Image (cartoon, rainbow, N blue to C red):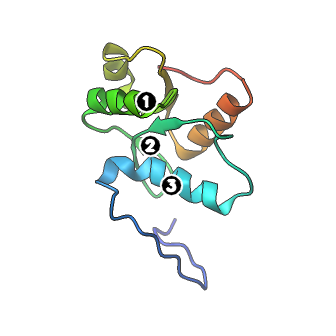
Amino acid sequence: MADEPLVDFNVTFNVEQVGGPSAGLMLSLALIDKLSPGELNGGRFIAGSGTIDSAGSVGPIGGIRYKLIAAKEAGATEFLVPADNCGEARKYAVDDLTLIRVEDLQGAISSIEGVKDGQEVPTC
């Protein structure tokens, strides 16, 4: 699998406010949302964090305790948590913020669609 797509066009993003590899999952989801019809999240405020590799696997991040607090203060109701961070996230859980366990990009998309449709999703 190549790390770069073989396409005959270029895409440019303004990511000056993106701060590090832990934004990989959310940046990937934002790209999918922009390239797909409708809103991926159905208008819900779903926050999250996680590194992502070229195969779509979501990796752990640092500082989840603070990211949970910031997400809740910003108004999020769900937070996508890398599977490897679930233990720490449960330890620092914030009231009324559902911790959604994600292992890969497809799982994150499925969980977002599940939340939007009122279905149960994997949690920490």
**Which residue is painted at 60% across and 44% down in the image?**
106
- Label 2 residue SS: strand
Instruction: Residue type at mark 1: give it.
Output: Ala
Q: Which residue is mark 3?
A: 28
- The answer to whether residue 29 is left or right of residue 64 is right
- The answer to whether residue 105 is left or right of residue 23 is right
Cα gap from disc 3 to disc 2, whole angstroms: 11 Å
Q: Is disc 3 in contact with disc 2, using a CB cutoff of under 8 Å? A: no
Q: Residues within 10 Å of mark 1 (few under 14, many from 20)?
A: many
Instruction: Return the x and y of residue 100 as percentages of the image width and height.
Output: 51, 27
Instruction: Residue type at mark 2: give it.
Output: Val
Instruction: Return the x and y of residue 9 as percentages of the image width and height.
Output: 59, 83
Seen in the picture, residue 109 relative to 123 is either above or below; the reply is: below
Q: Nearer the viewer, residue 42 or 4?
A: 42
Q: How many marks?
A: 3
Give the mark nearer the N terminus: 2 vs 1.
2
Give the mark nearer the N terminus: 3 vs 1.
3
Residue 83 - label: 1
Instruction: Residue type at mark 3: give it.
Output: Ser
Q: Which residue is mark 2?
A: 58
- Label 1 residue SS: helix
Residue 22 - label: none
Q: Is disc 3 in contact with disc 1, using a CB cutoff of under 8 Å? A: no
Give the mark nearer the N terminus: 3 vs 2.
3
> Which image quadrant for residue 66?
top left
Seen in the picture, residue 31 relative to 120 is either above or below; the reply is: below
Given this view, does label 3 or label 1 mark the residue nearer the observer?
Answer: 3
Instruction: Return the x and y of residue 107 as percentages of the image width and height.
Output: 59, 38
Cα gap from disc 2 to disc 1, whole angstroms: 8 Å
Instruction: Return the x and y of residue 72 as percentages of the image width and height.
Output: 41, 27
